[in-house]
Image (cartoon, helix red, strand yellow):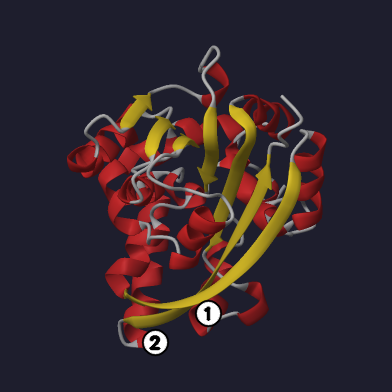
Amino acid sequence: MLASSKRIEQSAGRTVFGNDANGYAEGRPDYPARVYDILRTTCRATPSTRVFEIGPGTGQATKRLLDLGCAVTAIEPDSRLADVLLAKCKSKTPGRLSLHIAAFEDVDFSDEKFDLGIAATSFHWLEQESALAKAKRLLKPGGQWAMWWTIFGDSSREDEFQRRTRSLFANLWRSPSHGSESQVPFALDAETRKAQLRGAGFASLSHELIQWTTTQTTSQVLALTSTFSTVAQLPQTEREILMKRLERIADLEFGGVVARNFVTVVYTASCRSDVS
């Protein structure tokens, strides 16, 4: 059996990224500004908004929500990532950040209700039906839900670096974000994502694709790549070999500066005011 047919277990998402928490914080780029426009407009995120965030990691989206003035309850299962999040956000959080170091499935909010729930490049690590049902239960009538992902490679406009290095990743284990054997990335499977949202009782569904291009130095390419679950879970020797190969290609064939095409997909939905 080829390694590419093997899948990383969903439970691995609770621990694999914390092995290098500072590297994760430094390697992951922010989401496009359009994501936060959607949160402000469609999801009505304002200084009075109470938000729960599933799997904030080191706080890329958390920090921006706090900048908007929101009060954020973050649920992060890995204490190592949570420590970095707190260090990054503590100056912004006088009474506005609450952190639960636990898996989303295990947190009991009792009767607490929120205006907005979000999951930024994290929801594929959860069992969809039960997690969406719980997310909906946590929202007030009329509350909003947003989940989004950045895919680090746009198949509709494949860049030269992606084309050149694709074979290096071909035999790695598959993340849940890779989707099914049909090769459709989880985030881009809009039909399934929307069907699951409807099944959980959400309404006013929408999704938007945000295509963007960024330029990365060799060190930035390596920093980002090291945060991929498929790479982070490799034995150290294999990981070092992969990174050296990427480094040589970026330096020798691209002059140390690489243009990358990425895509971020955002799904939003509402909890109907006539439904509890």
Q: How crowded is mark 2: few (under 14 residues within 10 Å), some or many (20 or more)?
A: few
- Residue 272 occupies quadrant: top right
Q: How far apart are marks 2 and 1 (CA)?
A: 10 Å
- Residue 32 occupies quadrant: bottom left
Q: Nearer the viewer, residue 227 or 127?
A: 127
Q: Nearer the viewer, residue 84 or 159?
A: 84
- Residue 188 % position (x, y): 69, 59
Q: In this view, does 2 lie to the left or right of 113?
A: right
Residue 93 vertical position relative to residue 110 in the rendered view, above or below = below
Residue type, label 2: Glu
Residue at screen point 71% across, 56% down: 206
Q: How crowded is mark 1: few (under 14 residues within 10 Å), some or many (20 or more)?
A: few
- Residue 76 % position (x, y): 42, 30
Q: Residue furthest left?
A: 91
Q: Is mark 2 on a helix, strand or loop?
A: helix
Q: Which of the two discs, 2 and 1, labels the residue nearer the N terminus? A: 1
Q: Is residue 220 left or right of residue 194?
A: left
**Residue 22, visible in the rendered structure:** yes
- Residue 170 % position (x, y): 61, 62
Q: Which of 17 and 117 is in front in this view?
A: 117
Residue ID for mark 1 = 164
Residue type, label 1: Arg
Residue at screen point 34% across, 85% down: 252
Residue 132 vertical position relative to residue 229 in the rendered view, above or below = above
**Residue 173, visible in the rendered structure:** no
Q: What element carries label 1?
A: helix
Residue at screen point 42% across, 40% down: 56
Callout 2–callout 1 Cβ contact below 8 Å: yes
Q: In this view, does 267 lie to the left or right of 244?
A: right
Numbered badge on residue 253: 2
Image quadrant occupied by the C terminus: top right
